Amino acid sequence: MEEITVHIEAEVNPTESEDKVKKAIENIFGPLQSKLQTVHKGGVLTAEISTRDPLFKLQNLLRRERIRAAARIALLEGADRKTLTLYLNKQVAFAGHLSFTKETAESPLGPIKVKITCENPKEIVNWLTSETM
């Protein structure tokens, strides 16, 4: 298994509850140790994990929601040489579902940003969207 780092962050706007933003993240990635960094208007909730563990729940959601093919397209768009970046709608995640979004404009409260650093991002995309476990 290759080395991997999963970095997750989401803005906590002044009108939002930190607990609800954390719940949105955990609905997609499972329980995580996160920390809130205060910024001038609200905060940023971050978590960083050096295992594939948080991706197992994401993989299961892709299967459950039957969006593997669409997810593959969205994930490959965010694949680079050593990173895979994706954005998820925070409000949809709070409801326990997945919706890929762009960095800005599509999510009024801001997205959940996920940056996966590894040797072969396309291998991670294949693993996340494969038909078999």
Image: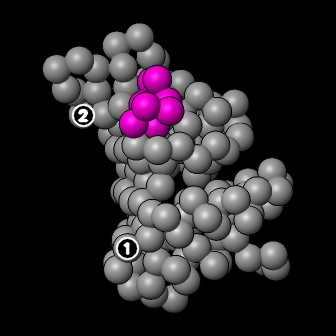
Query: Can residue 34 be spotted in the picture?
Result: no
Q: Which residue is mark 2?
A: 37
In the depicted structure, whether residue 112 falls above or below residue 56: above
Q: Measuring 22% from the left and 27% from the top, which residue is drawn there? A: 38
Q: Quadrant of the C terminus?
A: bottom right
Three-letter amino acid code of the residue under disc 1 = Asp
In the depicted structure, whether residue 58 falls above or below residue 44: below
Identify the image quadrant of residue 79: bottom left
Residue that sits furthest to the top in the current view: 15
- Mark 2 or mark 1, whichever is nearer to me: 1
Where does the image place residue 95, in percent across and percent down from the top left?
69, 30
As helix, strand or loop, the secondary structure at mark 2 comes to strand
What main secondary structure does the magenta stretch of the protein show? loop
Three-letter amino acid code of the residue under disc 2 = Gln
Label placed on residue 80: 1
Task: Determine if the magenta segment contains residue 8.
Answer: no
